[in-house]
Amino acid sequence: MLAYGPTPPNTAKIIFQIHFVSQSELTTFVFYLILKPELLSIMKNKLGIISGFVLGIAGFLFLFKIIILDNTPPEDELAPGIVLFASIMNGFLFAFIGYQIQHYITKKRNYKV
């Protein structure tokens, strides 16, 4: 039966522990600890691409908000699909630039990141 009203402190602590430490979360955490070295070795090669993509999208959206949205009256309509498409294209451009920088650095230092 579902009780209404304040729950005792011990019950809240038990519910919190059961909710956040389920079997699937525990299994996921164990697999992450086992696969962590392999994931890190894969991700080191993609660091320039991923960081360039994220910085490109975030930078475009931030500048769009500062330059365009602050100067646009609320009555005007903006096409959100075009803004999203432009931010993703900017992310791809910055991902390419990040890949080129990472490739140049690894070639110059003559070791694999």
Image (cartoon, rainbow, N blue to C red):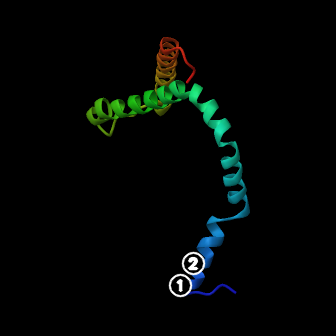
Disc marking residue 9: 1
Answer above or below: position of 46 versus 106: below
Answer above or below: position of 70 versus 27: above
Residue drawn 54% across the image and 87% down it: 5
Answer above or below: position of 2 versus 97: below
Q: Position of residue 111 (x, y in %)?
A: 55, 18
> Residue type at mark 2?
Lys
Quadrant holding the C terminus: top right
Q: CA distance from mark 2 to mark 1?
A: 6 Å
Report helix, strand or loop for mark 1: helix
Quadrant holding the N terminus: bottom right
Residue drawn 55% across the image and 87% down it: 8
Query: Can residue 85 be seen from the camera position used here?
Result: no
Report helix, strand or loop for mark 2: helix
Left or right, residue 102 beside residue 66: right
Q: Position of residue 53 (x, y in %)?
A: 50, 27
Q: Position of residue 81 (x, y in %)?
A: 50, 30
Q: Residue beneath label 2, please?
A: 13
